[in-house]
């Protein structure tokens, strides 16, 4: 049996971790391109910039993954290396300049899925906030995936929720 996990951020009312804000003004890559799927041509990738306040920056140095407002894991290279071993054809690494009052770090990258999969079982899930009914939602009290939904992939994006799914 294949397992699938959702790689997600903590609920906003319980955030105690640093939270990275995407800076569309300084980035050469619009945030909407990161939160989608499909390969971004290497020449189009450009620079992605995220910011942290000084309190968050002190915590971030000790973390391998930082919650971010862009629907992609923001991770250190050691995590990228692990995921690449299994999901090289399913992901794209987008290098990030992480800016804070303490300076600039280039230790983090977005781990961007390249494929959509249909994981959400809408009959067994309790979806409370649809953007487009039957096509896209943003909140669920209970989220249930179809068995084997990720198939042979190891990293993908759920077509209905945009969550990153990892096997």
Image (cartoon, rainbow, N blue to C red):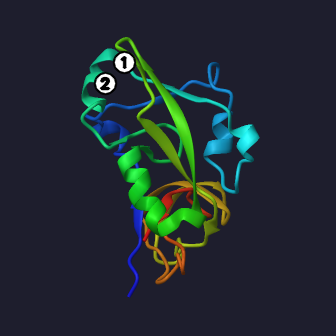
Disc 1 target residue: 53
Under circle 2, the secondary element is helix
Question: Dots 2 and 1: beta carbons under 8 Å?
Answer: yes
On the image, the x and y values in percent for residue 47 come to 62, 30
- Counting every numbered tag in the picture gives 2
Residue positioned 65% across, 51% down in the render: 36
Q: Residues within 10 Å of mark 1 (few under 14, many from 20)?
A: some
The answer to whether residue 129 is above or below residue 105 is below
Q: Report the front residue among 16 and 103.
A: 103
In this view, the residue farthest toward the bottom is 1
On the image, the x and y values in percent for residue 110 come to 51, 44
- The numbered dot on residue 13 is none
Q: Report the front residue among 116 and 125.
A: 116
Residue positioned 67% across, 40% down in the render: 32
Answer whether residue 157 is visible to the viewer in this image: no
Q: Report the front residue among 120 and 157.
A: 157
In this view, the residue farthest toward the top is 101
Disc 2 target residue: 56
Q: Residues within 10 Å of mark 2 (few under 14, many from 20)?
A: some
The answer to whether residue 136 is above or below residue 109 is below
On the image, the x and y values in percent for residue 152 come to 54, 80
Under circle 1, the secondary element is loop
Quarter of the picture holding the N terminus: bottom left
On the image, the x and y values in percent for residue 112 come to 56, 51
Residue positioned 62% across, 19% down in the render: 26
């Amino acid at each position: 049996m294949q397992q699938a996990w959702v790689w997600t951020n903590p609920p906003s009312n319980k955030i105690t971790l640093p939270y990275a804000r995407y800076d569309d003004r300084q980035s050469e890559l619009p945030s909407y391109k990161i939160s989608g799927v499909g390969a971004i041509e290497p020449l189009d990738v450009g620079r992605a910039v995220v910011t942290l306040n000084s309190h968050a920056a002190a915590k971030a140095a000790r973390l391998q993954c930082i919650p971010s407002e862009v629907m992609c894991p923001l991770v250190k290279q050691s995590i990228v290396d692990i995921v690449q071993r299994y999901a090289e054809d399913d992901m794209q690494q987008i290098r990030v300049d992480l800016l804070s009052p303490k300076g600039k770090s280039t230790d983090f990258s977005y781990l961007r899925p390249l494929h959509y999969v249909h994981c959400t079982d809408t009959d067994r899930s309790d979806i409370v906030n649809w953007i487009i009914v039957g096509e896209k939602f943003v909140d669920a009290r209970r989220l249930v995936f179809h068995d084997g939904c990720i198939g042979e992939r190891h990293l993908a994006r759920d077509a209905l929720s945009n969550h990153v799914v990892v096997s």
